[in-house]
Image: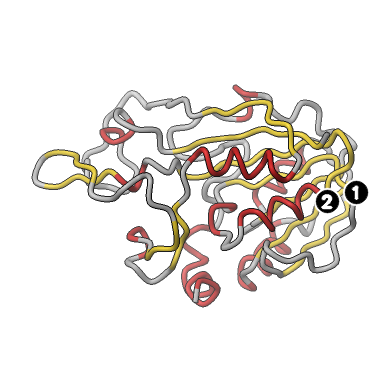
Amino acid sequence: MNKQRWEISAERFFGRTALPEYGPFALTEAQLKLFGSICGKKVLDIGCGSGHSLQYMGKEEARELWGLDLCTKQIETARKVLKDQQAEVKLVESPMEENPGLPIGYFDIVYSIYALGWTTDLSRTFSHIYDYLKPGGTFVFSWEHPLHDRLKFEESSFTFNKSYVIEGPEYNEGWQNLAVIHHRKLSTYINTLIEAGFMIEKVIDDVCLPDEQSENPAKWYSTQKANLVPATFIIKASKK
């Protein structure tokens, strides 16, 4: 179901929420410097989308650019975006819950920008990512903060209309209930990383607001809501 919706809706997301940005109202890689030097590194993008984060990695002189995505249309777009890269480019169409033949213990950096929360099996996905990394390798990902869609603007004020503590699959309101996504607490992401063997280095949910307020507080990402709860969280972890 989700793959079908992505094939229909992919163009909406071409070039959106890509490095050096981590997500709405979040600090950027220029501010956080989570990756350190990328020059000469082999990198893998989980949920690579239209390839713009990999394009950033190429500009930072990564040696190999690998991308994984469920959506055929996204992979086709990424090939066009990355066609002039000097680095070696390998793009694979596959769900992140499966290993489609990616090398084990190979990558210096694995990352995911606003994509990893789509997984239907978080534990399995983290285990694959752990396997892909070299010992000492870095894993960085960002995703919508799990408090964000619990809060809704209704009748001139924000209210919590969903439980934060009840986890599981649910229809995604941002996709007009035509896609299913799993609600998980922030602690679930952290604990599942630890269970997969990762060492957590940073958890970031700082909010960086623009000078101007959104005109419509009912927008999915509005400055009014970001004044109350973070829109984005970022985690940096490493393979022991």
The residue closer to the viewer here, 118 or 193, is 193
Image point (63%, 41%), residue name: 141
The residue closer to the viewer here, 162 or 102, is 162
From the viewer's perspective, is 113 left or right of 165?
right
Label disc, if present, on residue 106 of the rendered structure? 1
Residue 190 found in image quarter: top right
Kind of residue at disc 1: Tyr
Image point (10%, 41%), residue name: 156
- SS for tag 2? helix
Residue 60: where, in percent of width, then height? 78, 35
Kind of residue at disc 2: Tyr
In the rendered image, the residue lying farthest to the left is 155
From the viewer's perspective, is 97 left or right of 175?
right
Label 2 Cα crowd, 10 Å radius (few <14 / some 14-19 / many 20+): many
Q: CA distance from mark 1 to mark 2?
A: 6 Å
Label pair 1/2, CB-CB below 8 angstroms: yes
